[in-house]
Image (cartoon, rainbow, N blue to C red):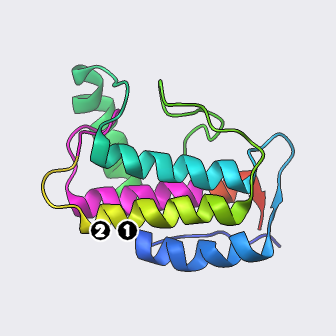
């Protein structure tokens, strides 16, 4: 029986993802590689510091986006189309070393933790606190791993 990953925070996610990057995990048919998945997660965290390249409308962020955010946080799980890249983000190749993807993720999380000041507005959810960003990014990673890999 397949296991379901849940992460309570980015710290929890990093601890557990490192083992997957070291030992490997089989991607489901048509899914992104572990390298691309981890790099995508890192990219999302990086954008929380730098700013996302494209945004949903303000109306979307204040209605559907906020509702989705609160549902995901309350459930402790996220569900979204894991084949969709971040809007207007640089593309990420599918081929790559999983440990390199993990290293990028780890560096992005470290930068997130050490960031002073406000975080950039999320492209779909709008303004988030550090705690909300930490949790939603952890849920984002868990969603990609649960849907994209045979765990």
How packed is label 1: few (under 14 Cα within 10 Å), some, or many (20 or more)? some
**The quarter of the displayed image where residue 31 is located:** top right
Residue 110 vertical position relative to residue 72 in the rendered view, above or below: below
Residue lying at the far left of the rendered structure? 117
**Residue 80 location, x and y as percent?**
55, 41
Residue 110: mark in rendering: 1
Q: Are marks 1 and 2 in contact (CB under 8 Å)?
A: yes
Residue 139 highlighted magenta (yes or no): yes
**Residue 150 location, x and y as percent?**
81, 62
Residue 94 vertical position relative to residue 110 in the rendered view, above or below: above
Q: Residue at x 49, y 53 (%)?
A: 42
Q: Nearer the viewer, residue 43 or 79?
A: 43
Q: Which residues are magenta?
A: 120-143
Residue 113: mark in rendering: 2
Q: Residue at x 53, y 31 (%)?
A: 90
**Res. 148 in view:** yes
Residue 57 vertical position relative to residue 139 in the rendered view, above or below: above
How packed is label 2: few (under 14 Cα within 10 Å), some, or many (20 or more)? few
How far apart marks 1 and 2 lie (CA) works out to 5 Å
**Residue 107 location, x and y as percent?**
45, 64
What SS does tag 1 mark? Answer: helix
What is the total number of numbered labels drawn onto the structure image? 2
Residue 95: mark in rendering: none
The C terminus sits in image quarter: bottom right
Q: Nearer the viewer, residue 144 or 88?
A: 88
């Amino acid at each position: 029986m397949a296991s379901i990953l849940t992460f309570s925070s980015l710290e929890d996610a990093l601890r557990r993802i490192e083992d997957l990057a070291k030992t490997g995990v089989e991607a489901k048919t048509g899914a992104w590689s572990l390298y691309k998945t981890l790099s995508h997660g890192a990219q999302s965290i990086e954008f929380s510091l730098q700013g996302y390249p494209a945004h949903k409308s303000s109306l979307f962020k204040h209605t559907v986006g906020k509702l989705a955010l609160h549902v995901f946080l309350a459930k402790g799980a996220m569900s979204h189309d894991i084949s969709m890249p971040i809007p207007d983000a640089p593309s990420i190749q599918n081929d790559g070393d999983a440990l390199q993807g993990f290293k990028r993720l780890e560096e992005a999380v470290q930068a997130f933790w050490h960031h002073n000041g406000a975080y950039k507005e999320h492209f779909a959810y709008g303004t988030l606190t550090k705690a909300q960003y930490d949790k939603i990014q952890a849920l984002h990673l868990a969603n990609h791993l649960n849907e994209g890999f045979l765990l």
